Image (spheres, grey):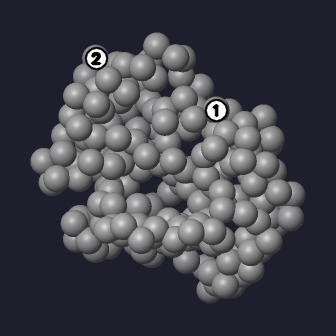
Amino acid sequence: MTLFRHVCPIPILAALVLTACQPLNGPTRSAAPTLGLQAWTYNNLTLAETADKAANLGIHHLQGFTRQRIGEGIGGTLAPTMDAATRGRILAILQEKGVTMTSMGVVSAINGTEWRQLFTFAKAMGMRDIAVEPPKAKWSTEIPLLDQLAREFGVGGTFHNHYDPDNPPEHLVAALQPYGKHMGFCADTGH
């Protein structure tokens, strides 16, 4: 997956990542934009090193991505299957650096069990939302499921869309329109 491959300068990318994800229904964010960084920007670094980069740039919010190496003595990668002790160690590292992982993405799942696992992980990590990208062929079954999980866990589902001329953003916006404030659209500003 080639998400946000330095198509635009990092400060611009950072500003867009977390401000581009908005609910379709309900209140819009009226406060000043929250500056955030998609960890994929530094996909060759560990999560701990990425948090250092973010903090040095004055950015305090990360959108993590699964499969990123963790670092600082913690083996493995960021994954929804990690145990509570590892999650706690990651949260402590981020807190020490003054960075919060407010989101995760872009993720997809094979079935309802995997989607539930992703939302459980996001809730345990204190995330605001998950940037998801189920295939269009599954929207009719997965959007209602994701809406249900978002409401149950209090973690939003923000739908990411890689650019596809056969699937313009208007299609996704229309598909999400019947759902509530827990569902939103996360524009792909890098593509």
Quadrant in which the C terminus appears:
bottom left
- Residue at 86% x, 64% y is 140
Q: Is residue 40 left or right of residue 51?
A: right
Q: Amino acid at mark 2?
A: Gly
Instruction: Count up the numbered dots.
Output: 2
Q: Element under label 2? A: loop
Q: Which residue is mark 1?
A: 120
14 or 31: nearer the eye?
A: 31
Q: Element under label 1? A: helix
* Distance between mark 2 and mark 1 Cα atoms: 25 Å
Crowd band around label 2 with a 10 angstrom C-alpha radius: few (<14), some (14–19), many (20+): few
With respect to residue 64, does 172 lie above or below?
below
Residue 129 in sight: yes
Contact? badges 2 and 1 (CB < 8 Å): no
With respect to residue 64, does 74 lie above or below?
above
Of labels 2 and 1, earlier in sequence is 2
Q: Residue furthest left?
A: 56
Q: Quadrant of residue 167?
A: bottom right
Residue 38 in the image, given as x and y percentages of width and height: 37, 55
- Residue at 32% x, 23% y is 92
Q: Is residue 119 left or right of residue 9?
A: right
Q: Residue furthest right?
A: 141
- Residue at 28% x, 40% y is 99
Residue 91 in the image, given as x and y percentages of width and height: 37, 27
Q: Which residue is mark 2?
A: 73
Q: Amino acid at mark 1?
A: Thr
Residue 77 in the image, given as x and y percentages of width and height: 44, 30
With respect to residue 52, does 41 lie above or below?
below
Residue 6 in sight: no
